[in-house]
Amino acid sequence: MRPKSKTLTEQELEIMKVVWARQLATVRDVYETLLEHRKIAYTTVMTMMKILEKKGYLKKQLQDRAYLYRPTEPQTVVLRKMVQEFVNHVFNGSAEPLLAHLVENRSISEKELRELMRLVREKS
């Protein structure tokens, strides 16, 4: 049996984006923010935040009668790991086919392409 993945699901990532933006958030804070965009149950948010805590993405502390959650790592670090895992899994560790796909399928704008080229020149 495969071990449970520590990778964020789509719903977990949505919750993490709210917590990263706020830095400290209660379940109610996250629930109300998500409700602005779509229907979701309070208990679903609570369960997902408990899962995120088990996975090591969130830490909680009791304040008054509610738990305050905070991210354990900055968003940039987590996203970098997720992208690297994707590249390893789908492209056998090489980012070149991914970039070629983005450029060839017009998934990347001219402005973004210029910025990428600038970044490549800086790293060379």
Image (cartoon, grey):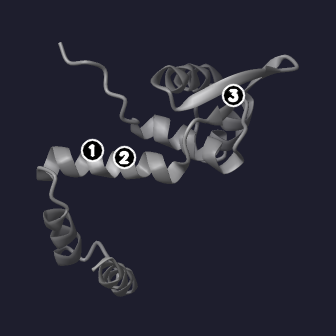
Mark 2 belongs to which amino acid?
A: Lys
- Out of 52 and 76, give the one closest to the viewer: 76
- Tell me if mark 3 has few (under 14), some (14-19) or many (20+) residues whose alpha carbon lies within 10 angstroms of its own: many
Q: Which residue lies under the disc numbered 1? A: 85
Would you say 100 lies left or right of 16 here? left
- Tell me if mark 1 has few (under 14), some (14-19) or many (20+) residues whose alpha carbon lies within 10 angstroms of its own: some
Q: Secondary structure at mark 3?
A: helix
Mark 3 belongs to which amino acid?
A: Val
Pointers 2 and 1 in contact (C-beta within 8 Å): yes
Q: Nearer the viewer, mark 3 or mark 2?
A: 2
- Out of 50 and 58, give the one closest to the viewer: 58
Q: Which residue lies under the disc numbered 3? A: 27
Q: Real-space Cα distance between discs 2 and 1?
A: 6 Å
Q: Secondary structure at mark 1?
A: helix
Q: Mark 1 or mark 3: name the one nearer the start of the chain.
A: 3
Mark 1 belongs to which amino acid?
A: Glu
Residue 122, x across and y down, in percent: 36, 82
Q: Which residue lies under the disc numbered 2? A: 81
Q: Secondary structure at mark 2?
A: helix
